[in-house]
Image (cartoon, rainbow, N blue to C red):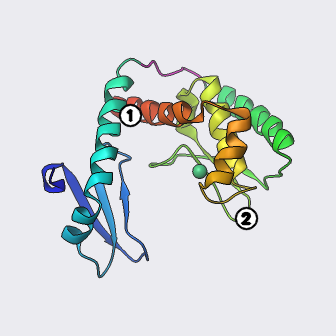
Amino acid sequence: MDPENFPHKVSYRNIRYPRIEFTTGELHFVLPLNSQYEELSRKHERWIQKKWTFIQDCLKESEKRELIQRSNDEFKGLALSLIIKAADELGVKPNSVYFRLMKTKWASISSKKNLTINKLARCLPDHLVEYMIVHELTHLKQKRHNDHFWEIIAKKFPDYEALEKELFVYWFRLISER
Ligand SMILES: [Zn+2]
């Protein structure tokens, strides 16, 4: 496999570490300003291949999913009640909650403990809204996606790997509509 064969995009940003994004279903290399694309793509060839296969699988699955129809208010109500429940269960306290349109993720949490939920997440089924919220709030206990993080998640969601994948599947379903 040669990464050159994948449809891809390369951007250079003022960052320290290279990353590879797949948010649009297209391979996107985001590289530090002075790095070499060829070198990195060759070095991570197997990882890219694995990711690519995963993405193709998600894209295929996404055709079978239906987006949930909810109003913005309905979604906010649901999300806020799930945030209160999850924060209580995890023993954490987010600062503020924002609902915004985001282009690359369902939700995020800042170092100031502000939780931002993508407004587009109103199309997710209830159980995925809940999972997404628990995932983000768990970052208040553990910032990184390390073993400790997944141990906490697994207590409530033993099938978290399938749920993480579903979030990708719905993401692709959503972008295919636009
Ligand atoms: Zn996370």
The reply to whether residue 77 is visible in this rendering is yes
Q: Earlier in the sequence, mark 1 or mark 2?
A: 2
**Residue 67 painted magenta:** yes
Checking the image for residue 112, the label placed there is 2
- Residue at image coords 22%, 71%: 39
Residue at left offset 25%, top offset 56%: 45
When the figure is inspected, residue 33 is found, relative to residue 18, above or below; the finding is below
Q: Quadrant of residue 15?
A: bottom left
Q: In this figure, what is the number of numbered marks?
A: 2
Q: Residue at x 61, y 59 (%)?
A: 144
97 with respect to 43 (left or right): right
Residue 36 found in image quarter = bottom left
164 shown above or below 35: above
Q: Under tag 1, what secondary structure?
A: helix
Give the side of residue 45 with respect to residue 13, left or right: left
Which residues fall within the magenta stretch?
65-70
Is residue 98 among what the camera can see? no
Q: Please, is residue 171 above or below residue 116 in the view? A: above
Quarter of image, res 20: bottom left
Main SS of residues in magenta: loop
Query: Which residue is rendered at x = 35% and y = 48% of the image?
Result: 22
> What residue did someone put label 1 on?
172
Q: Going by the image, does 113 lie left or right of 53?
A: right
- Please state which amino acid type lies under the numbered disc 1: Phe
Of residues 14 and 39, the one nearer the viewer is 39
What's the residue type where badge 2 is placed?
Lys
In the image, residue 43 lies at what x, y percent? 27, 65
Q: Name above or below for residue 16 compared with residue 42.
A: below
Give x and y (percent) for residue 114.
Answer: 71, 56
Is 109 a magenta residue?
A: no
